[in-house]
Image (spheres, grey):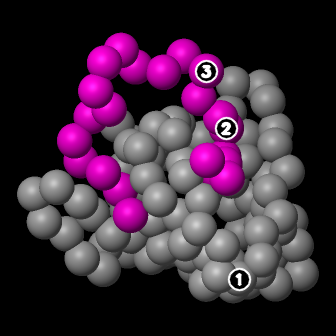
C-alpha cells in the first residue's frame, strides 16, 4: 500500500493511532498535489471548505466540500490536486480492519455521502 504519510509527508501526518484505527491530518494550499497513495476504508472530516480533483485509473472526479462535512471514503488508491482558491484541512479516520466479505469492485472514487 502506498501510505500517504510516506508518499506525501509534507501534506499528511499521523495525529493518533491504535491497533484498530489511524487518524491522519491533511493540509495543503491551492496548487498542491499528492502522489499516488492508498487509503483503507475511512471516514473523512472536512475542517475547511475546498475544491479538488481526485484521479485514478484515467478517471478524474471533481470534489467540492464545505467545512464540517463528514464523508465515507471506500478503500482506494488515487492522487489529488487542490484546484480551488482555499487551503484544504481535513482528517481521515482510517479503519485497519478489512471490510467483511469480498472486496468491493464498485468503490466510489473520492468521498461519498454514504
- Give the mark, 1 or 2, whose residue is nearer the N terminus: 1
**Relative image position of residue 16 (x, y in whole percent):** 24, 76
Q: Residue 88, can we see it?
A: yes
**Relative image position of residue 92 (x, y in whole percent):** 45, 65
Q: Name the residue under label 3.
A: 106
How dense is the environment of label 1, judged by Cα within 10 Å: few (below 14), some, or many (20 and up)?
some
In the image, 100: left or right of 41?
left
**Relative image position of residue 106 (x, y in whole percent):** 61, 21
Q: Name the residue under label 2.
A: 109
Q: How far apart are marks 1 and 2 (CA)?
A: 20 Å
Q: Mark 1 points at which residue?
A: 67
Q: Quadrant of the N terminus?
A: top left
- Give the mark, 1 or 3, whose residue is nearer the N terminus: 1
Do the numbered discs 1 and 3 sit on residues whose CB atoms are within 8 Å? no
Q: In this view, does 41 lie above or below 12?
A: above
Q: Distance between the residues labelled 1 and 3?
A: 27 Å
Tag of residue 103 = none
How dense is the environment of label 2, judged by Cα within 10 Å: few (below 14), some, or many (20 and up)?
many
- Magenta residues (range): 93-114
Amino acid at each position: 500500500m502506498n501510505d500517504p504519510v510516506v508518499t506525501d509527508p509534507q501534506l499528511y501526518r499521523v495525529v493518533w493511532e491504535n491497533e484498530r484505527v489511524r487518524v491522519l491530518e491533511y493540509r495543503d494550499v491551492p496548487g498542491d498535489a499528492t502522489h499516488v497513495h492508498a487509503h483503507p476504508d475511512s471516514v473523512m472530516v472536512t475542517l475547511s471548505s475546498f475544491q479538488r480533483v481526485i484521479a485514478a485509473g484515467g478517471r478524474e472526479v471533481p470534489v467540492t466540500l464545505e467545512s464540517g462535512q463528514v464523508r465515507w471514503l471506500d478503500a482506494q488508491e488515487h492522487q489529488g490536486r487542490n484546484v480551488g482558491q482555499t487551503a484544504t484541512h481535513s482528517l481521515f479516520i482510517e479503519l485497519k480492519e478489512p471490510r467483511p466479505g469480498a472486496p468491493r469492485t464498485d468503490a466510489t472514487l473520492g468521498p461519498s455521502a454514504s
